[in-house]
């Protein structure tokens, strides 16, 4: 017996020693394409937390136990590889490019999936694609790179807002922007400042972003329920990884240039055309010369207002990040500073950001994480979009060239009071302060607890905070403000947006072929907004611009508003043998914004996927790597309305019997509820010829219903209208995405990425059976279109402008019945094309972005292209080709002061004369990069050095008759801030 016990103890001891014995495995990781070493590769023992990272020469070493069987090698953009260890002490690995990306992790709502599991329409943009591009906000990164997503500029001002539409325009009176989520935090988008365009999304440094996922259909977005009708954009920021600390530093500087100007008349040309306009109207030439001077005067003042206002600006971007960690704690820290001058004097933008992302594994079951970001944005702005005399984009072009900008002593000259309210635009831009300052934080805390191997719990809370101040100082040195001693206005706005959720998540595999996963949770969201503003007048000195120095308190106002939304959500997924997938999502949301009887709504989606390439009948089709069909249907909601649209409201009625009084200002509707979007999607994913061709094709339809409309009420109700749900709208189209590897010869590689979307937008139904609402909405037409007169040119006999009447005949005198549909402001196709060429350490990317099929109304020409006939505004040079004699063929009518020939309609008409084709193709980006050879860097202990030069908005092909077809998201332009051309050079260093 004793011998048996000793034998067992001996055997157990030997087994323990064997299991405890460790040894070192070493090796080198290289690229299979060029054989170069790859630093930063994560090397892990499969099934454990033991890991390391390769050094700058691609070398690694890892201590393993004898029981460890497999090493896993991972690196972003390359296929992961599992290698059996066996008895080897040296394991070299060559990693291949991740062309098919089937195992790419895609962030999906409250979890993530691999690309092969996704059944909804989800598009991804990886952070490395736009890293170090001179962009202030991440929404710019989607432009031309995601099929079905149209991104246009609301303003070309540095840091300005963008207009993002996913699969068309889904509403008329509610919001049309997607829901943005950063690391689980639902954030507000849009403008932060009223003193220049400042993008709320710009608080996130694009260099901090790991990936952007765009949810385009209901199957992908339905778990967000009542806020997902316009699509969802998920932003995931970078995280730390296990291994030694990596430091990345980047710097770039460059030039900012205007992309073009209107060619306006000089003083002599304007005097000439105005003289002719006066004479044709029966006025004297002296009357014209008293204002505009004589065209024959060789000493006529000739000011160049455009040259005095526009400039070549400078920009600089500095960025630093640190990442690393051990098996329990990982971190990512970053900081950045951006300074970007605009193309207009005194217009600039600066941003400073800081970020800290932490993750810590407390126990084998409990992990906690925290993301903290802080940002400061400052915009020194210029007013744009509108007929403002203090806007350089209006007054800069229409100011009279015969008026001096400066006096002989260098002081600002006084502008004639009968034009532009006597506002010298150069003095105004230099002396009027328009500044917006914002402090923002997008932060979160998260807890993950693994209850069972297949069951987990997640608790999350997030904060989107912004504190904004707008300043506008109009000093008394500007004559138009001198009468009241100048003014200063300050407006402070604080927005606190919090969301929290708790959910249980399941992932269980059984019998090797069945996988069931799901999530069940609750979410709560609250947003508060408070604004206070004050204006003072009468300042003793222009340098004293704060309110305590004002002689007269002029205006004080403020408000507070809030709303609450909560919801329950559930999602179930089933996968059979990596062939068939079925997903079901249900969410029920309640919102304080809607009527007391209609605050809750139920939303959901169902989707399925079938991988044909895994079927036995495809086994011999060698050129097909992956072929998958997807289909989905679902309903999402739109809650993007003002907080009190459903309520009966009272407001101030002024003074009554010596005291304050109230009156009803809005009639409530207890039945007011969500707009709904019913979405259908059928898609195909294919990877062909060993990953050389990757195709994604989606056909979709999105019907918006229960649209919000102000509907008419009887006059005796005391109210003109009431807001209620009525009407239907349809968007439908096709999204196509193609990625190809065209050529691989030795170290040379050429790849192409192309995407396009074609779609239509149609109003299906209005309320109460109406077929149209004025000239704004017509059943059967898109919701954004132009309606006016069809210009027929100039009568060669007398120079009068002609139009087509209702019967298609020429007419001089227009009626309302002569108006007609003139085209849509919505393009029916848009997308992008990128070609990337690589040879060794050199890479060149050429990226084009385009849109096609939209019309554009150039309201800038409403005053500047009137043959010198209206007011004192300067004119474009092409107006000199006006009609002069019978038989002359021209498109510019006879100059006629006042702009209206007796018996004719006026010159200023909404007509095809001012509407042009808004289609364009733009060379959006050219980037040339060079990675220094590793052999040069090893001695300096530097992992990577990359130098680059890049250009943005380098060339545009268009028939548009304005400055910038891109800054045309509203279908018309009037005093808009155009985009700029940017050329930068920089360097990246990784240690």
Image (spheres, helix red, strand yellow):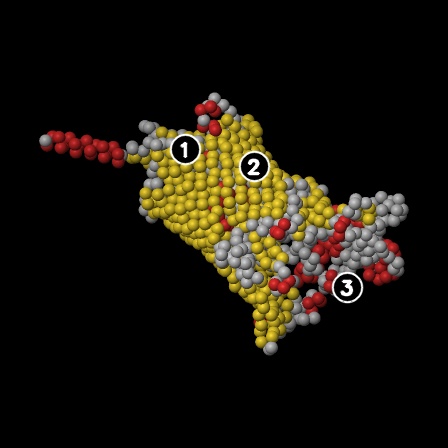
User: Which of the two discs, 2 and 3, labels the residue nearer the N terminus?
Assistant: 3
Rate crowding at label 1 as few (under 14), some (14 to 19) or many (20 or more) other CA atoms within 10 Å: some
Determine the secondary structure under disc 3: loop
Residue nearest the observer in this picture, 413 or 165 = 165
Label 3 belongs to which residue?
Answer: 418
Q: What count of labels does the image hold?
A: 3
Determine the secondary structure under disc 1: strand
Residue 410 in view: no
Given contact means CB atoms under 8 Å apart, are the residues at marks 2 and 1 in contact? no
> At which x and y percent is residue 755?
58, 37
> At which x and y percent is residue 981?
64, 46
User: Which of the two discs, 3 and 1, labels the residue nearer the N terminus?
Assistant: 3
Residue nearest the observer in this picture, 157 or 598 = 598
Quarter of the image where the N terminus is located: top left
Numbered mark located on residue 699 in the image: 2
- Residue 887 is left or right of residue 702, and the answer is right
């Amino acid at each position: 017996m004793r011998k048996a016990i000793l034998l067992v103890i001996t055997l157990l001891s030997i087994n323990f020693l064997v299991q405890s014995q460790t040894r070192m495995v070493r090796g080198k990781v290289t690229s299979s394409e060029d054989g170069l070493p790859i630093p930063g590769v994560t090397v892990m023992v499969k099934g454990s937390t033991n890991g390391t990272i390769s050094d700058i020469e691609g070398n690694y070493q890892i201590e393993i136990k004898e029981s460890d069987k497999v090493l896993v090698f991972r690196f972003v953009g390359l296929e992961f590889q599992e290698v059996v260890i066996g008895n080897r002490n040296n394991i070299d690995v060559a990693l291949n490019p991740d062309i098919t990306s089937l195992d790419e992790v895609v962030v999906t709502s409250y979890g993530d999936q691999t690309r092969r599991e996704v059944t909804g329409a989800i598009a991804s943009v990886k952070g490395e694609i736009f890293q170090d591009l001179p962009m202030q906000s991440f929404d710019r990164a989607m432009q031309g790179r995601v099929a079905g997503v149209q991104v246009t500029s609301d303003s070309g001002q540095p840091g300005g807002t963008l207009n993002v539409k996913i699969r068309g325009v889904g509403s008329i009176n509610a919001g049309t922007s997607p829901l943005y989520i950063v690391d689980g935090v639902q954030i507000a988008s849009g403008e932060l400042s009223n003193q220049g365009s400042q993008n709320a999304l710009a608080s996130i440094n694009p260099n901090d972003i790991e990936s952007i996922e765009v949810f385009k259909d209901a199957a992908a977005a339905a778990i967000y329920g009542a806020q997902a009708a316009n699509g969802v954009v998920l932003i995931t920021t970078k995280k730390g990884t296990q291994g030694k600390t990596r430091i990345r530093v980047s710097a770039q500087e460059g030039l900012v240039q205007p992309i073009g100007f209107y060619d306006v008349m000089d003083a002599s040309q304007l005097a000439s055309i105005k003289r002719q306009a006066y004479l044709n109207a029966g006025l004297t030439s002296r009357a014209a010369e008293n204002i505009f001077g004589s065209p024959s005067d060789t000493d006529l003042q000739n000011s160049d207002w455009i040259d005095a206002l526009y400039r070549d600006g400078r920009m600089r971007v500095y960025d630093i990040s640190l990442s690393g960690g051990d098996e329990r704690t990982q971190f990512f820290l970053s900081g950045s500073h951006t300074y970007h001058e605009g193309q207009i004097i005194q217009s600039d933008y600066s941003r400073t950001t800081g970020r800290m992302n932490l993750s810590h594994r407390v126990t084998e079951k409990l992990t906690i994480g925290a993301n903290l970001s802080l940002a400061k944005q400052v915009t020194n702005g210029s007013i744009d979009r509108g007929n403002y005399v203090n806007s350089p984009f209006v007054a800069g072009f229409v100011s009279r060239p015969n008026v001096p900008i400066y006096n002989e002593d260098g002081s600002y000259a006084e502008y004639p009071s009968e034009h532009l309210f006597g506002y010298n635009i150069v003095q105004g831009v230099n002396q009027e302060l328009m500044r917006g300052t914002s402090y923002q934080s997008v932060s979160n805390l998260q807890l993950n607890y693994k209850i069972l191997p297949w069951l987990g719990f997640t608790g999350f809370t997030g904060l989107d905070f912004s504190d904004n101040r707008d300043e506008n100082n109009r000093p008394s040195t500007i004559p138009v403000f001198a009468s009241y001693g100048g003014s200063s206005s300050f407006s402070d706005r604080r927005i606190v947006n919090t969301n929290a959720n708790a959910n249980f998540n399941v992932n269980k595999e059984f019998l090797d072929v069945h996988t069931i996963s799901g999530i069940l949770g609750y979410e709560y969201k609250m947003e508060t907004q408070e604004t206070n503003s004050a204006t003072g007048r009468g300042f003793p000195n222009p340098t004293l611009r704060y309110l305590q120095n004002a002689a007269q308190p002029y205006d004080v106002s403020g408000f507070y508003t809030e709303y609450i939304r909560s919801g329950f959500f559930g999602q179930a997924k089933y996968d059979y043998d990596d062939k068939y997938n079925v997903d079901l999502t249900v969410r029920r949301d309640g919102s304080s914004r809607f009527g007391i009887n209609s605050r809750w709504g139920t939303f959901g989606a169902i989707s399925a996927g079938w991988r044909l390439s895994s079927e036995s009948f495809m086994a011999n089709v060698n050129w097909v790597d992956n072929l998958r069909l997807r289909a989905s249907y679902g309903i999402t909601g739109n809650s993007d309305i003002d907080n009190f649209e459903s309520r009966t409201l009272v407001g101030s009625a002024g003074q009554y019997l010596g005291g304050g009084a109230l009156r009803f200002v809005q009639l409530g509707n207890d039945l007011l509820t969500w707009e709904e979007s019913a979405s259908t999607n059928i898609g195909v994913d294919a990877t062909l010829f060993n990953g050389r061709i990757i195709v994604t094709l989606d056909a979709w339809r999105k019907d918006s219903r229960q649209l919000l409309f102000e509907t008419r009420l009887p006059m005796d109700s005391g109210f003109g209208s009431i807001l209620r749900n009525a009407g239907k709208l349809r968007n439908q189209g096709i999204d196509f995405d193609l990625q190809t590897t065209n050529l691989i010869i030795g170290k040379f590689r050429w790849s192409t990425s192309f995407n396009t979307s074609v779609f239509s937008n149609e109003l299906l139904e209005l309320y109460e059976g109406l077929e149209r609402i004025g000239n704004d909405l017509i059943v059967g037409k898109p919701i954004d279109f132009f309606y006016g007169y069809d210009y027929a040119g100039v009568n060669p006999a007398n120079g009068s402008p002609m139009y087509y009447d209702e019967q298609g005949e020429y007419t001089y005198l227009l009626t309302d019945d002569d108006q007609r549909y003139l085209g849509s402001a919505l393009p029916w196709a848009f997308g992008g094309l990128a070609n990337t060429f690589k040879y060794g350490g050199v890479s060149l990317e050429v990226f084009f972005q385009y849109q096609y099929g939209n019309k554009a109304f150039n309201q800038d020409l409403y005053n500047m292209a009137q043959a010198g006939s209206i007011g004192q505004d300067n004119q474009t040079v092409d107006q000199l080709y006006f009609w002069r004699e019978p038989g002359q063929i021209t498109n510019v009518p006879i100059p006629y002061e006042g702009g209206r020939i007796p018996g004719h309609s006026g010159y200023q008409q909404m007509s095809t004369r001012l509407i042009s084709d808004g289609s364009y193709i733009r060379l959006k980006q050219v980037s040339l990069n060079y990675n220094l050879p590793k052999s040069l860097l090893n001695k300096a202990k530097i992992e990577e050095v990359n130098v680059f030069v890049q250009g943005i908005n380098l060339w545009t092909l268009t028939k548009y008759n304005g400055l910038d077809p891109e800054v045309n998201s509203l279908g018309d332009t009037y005093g808009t801030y155009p985009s700029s051309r940017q050329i930068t050079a920089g360097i990246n260093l990784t240690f």
